[in-house]
């Protein structure tokens, strides 16, 4: 079971760049694409700034910084998935 969970997590991480590309393809025809893109970049900067300064509050003491790296990956991948679902919603709404 542990190996299955590890494989699922790896799959979700590895497919995220593909989902990011699909999201840009789905939303590039929107009139508000520059605004959406700017908001995503701003949120990314906020995530990274927050994690840089406050990761110890979330992960506790981390001698080698591996939990901090894991948090970076978690925030980036979750942001990509949220953006993907929002892009699918926008594409669906546009086609109606």
Image: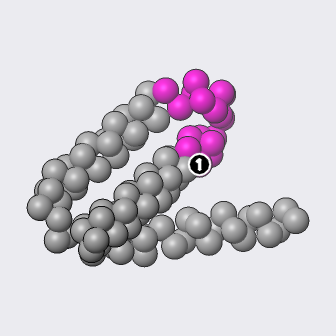
Say which quarter of the image contains residue 65.
top right
In the shown orientation, is residue 36 left or right of residue 9? left
Residue 50 vs 6, above or below: the answer is: above
Residue 16 vs 57, above or below: the answer is: below
Give the x, y percent position of residue 38. 19, 49
How many circles with numbers are drawn on the protein? 1
Give the x, y percent position of residue 69. 55, 47
Q: Residue at the location (15% across, 56% down)?
A: 32
Say which quarter of the image contains residue 23.
bottom left
Give the x, y percent position of residue 33. 17, 60
Q: Secondary structure at mark 1?
A: helix
In the shown orientation, is residue 95 left or right of residue 47? left
Q: Is residue 63 visible?
A: yes
Q: Main secondary structure of the magenta part?
A: helix
Task: Give the position of the N terminus as an image quadrant.
Answer: bottom right
Q: Residue at the location (69% across, 68% down)?
A: 8
Say which residue label 1 marks: 70
In the image, the segment drawn in magenta is: 54-71
Q: Residue at the location (62% across, 72% down)?
A: 11
Q: Residue at the location (56% across, 44% down)?
A: 71
Task: Give the position of the C terminus as an image quadrant.
Answer: bottom left
Give the x, y percent position of residue 3. 82, 68
Residue at the right extreme, as displayed? 1
Is residue 59 within the magenta segment? yes
Is residue 34 within the magenta segment? no
């Amino acid at each position: 079971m542990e190996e299955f969970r590890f494989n699922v997590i790896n799959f979700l991480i590895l497919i995220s760049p593909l989902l990011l590309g699909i999201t840009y393809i789905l939303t590039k025809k929107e009139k508000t694409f520059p605004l959406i893109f700017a908001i995503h970049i701003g949120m990314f900067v906020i995530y990274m700034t927050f994690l840089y300064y406050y990761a110890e509050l979330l992960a506790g003491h981390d001698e080698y910084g591996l939990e901090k790296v894991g948090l970076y990956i978690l925030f980036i991948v979750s942001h990509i998935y949220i953006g993907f679902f929002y892009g699918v919603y926008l594409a669906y709404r546009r086609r109606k």
